[in-house]
Image (cartoon, rainbow, N blue to C red):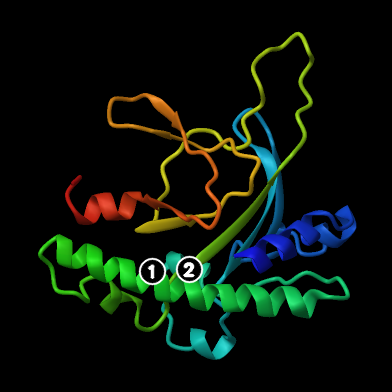
Amino acid sequence: IDAVMHQTAKFFASSQSDKEAISIKNSPHFRGYGMLKNYRDWREQIHIGVESSQSDLKDIKDSPYWQLWGKNQWPVSADATEFKSCVLAYFEAVDSLARSLLTLLAQALDKPGDYFTERMKDRPYLLMKAMSYLPQERAISDYSPQMGVTAHCDWSWLTFLIQDDVGGLEAQDIQGSWRKVNPLKNSIVVNTGELLEIETGGY
């Protein structure tokens, strides 16, 4: 985690031209760098997925969702190899953590232990989205700060969320009240996503 935080911070501190060299607009698989500056979101980010090759794609049909499976765009800086090896090692660790937690969740739901992980055998869809929140640019007279990420639901089974020490994350409780999720050293916030809600009939 520390290594990934260090590497992604270095990437966001690099030149805009280096970041734009791997623009998500260049990727048919929606991977790479992007910037969002609008009423909903105020951030820059990089999307990286499980590394795949053309040979992985040979038996994939024409279903539109398979467009998500493909190659990453990696940073173009001199130490890009270090970034790539760091992130791929992180993916291995997250994959292991996900399988352990999904097994426990399946058992807690009185399902077979491999209820979820059986579907991760061939092409597990793991996505890392590293985000850097942009400086606030609103006028001093406007007391409402610009949201880095607006209120949303994650779509996945699970999201493992890492914070730095700046904070800002909030979660809505079942009564509809927003609560701060303060950064805690060496912790991972686990969000359940919409797919898990669907799988469990809203439970």
At numbered mark 1, what does the secondary structure look like: helix, strand or loop? helix
Amino acid identity at mark 1: Ala
On the image, the x and y values in percent for residue 77 come to 86, 71
* Residue designated by label 2: 126
Q: Nearer the viewer, residue 203 or 124?
A: 203
**Quarter of the rendering containing residue 82:** bottom right
| Marks 2 and 1 close (CB-CB < 8 Å) | yes
Residue drawn at (58%, 86%), measured in percent from left and top?
Answer: 54
Residue drawn at (38%, 58%), measured in percent from left and top?
Answer: 158
On the image, the x and y values in percent for residue 194 come to 33, 49
On the image, the x and y values in percent for residue 167 come to 60, 39
Residue sitting farthest toward the top: 141
Q: Is residue 136 left or right of residue 15?
A: left
Instruction: From the image, state whether disc 2 or disc 1 is nearer to you.
Output: 1
On the image, the x and y values in percent for residue 149 come to 58, 37
Disc number placed over residue 33 in the picture, else none: none
Q: In this view, does 95 lie to the left or right of 85?
A: left
At numbered mark 2, what does the secondary structure look like: helix, strand or loop? loop
Q: Can residue 186 be seen in this view?
A: yes
* Residue designated by label 1: 98
Q: Is residue 62 visible?
A: no
Residue drawn at (77%, 34%), measured in percent from left and top?
Answer: 135
Residue drawn at (64%, 64%), measured in percent from left and top?
Answer: 2
Residue sitting farthest toward the front: 185
Q: Quadrant of the N terminus?
A: bottom right
**Quarter of the rendering containing residue 152:** top left
Q: How crowded is mark 2: few (under 14 residues within 10 Å), some or many (20 or more)?
A: some
Spatial CA span between label 2 and label 1: 9 Å
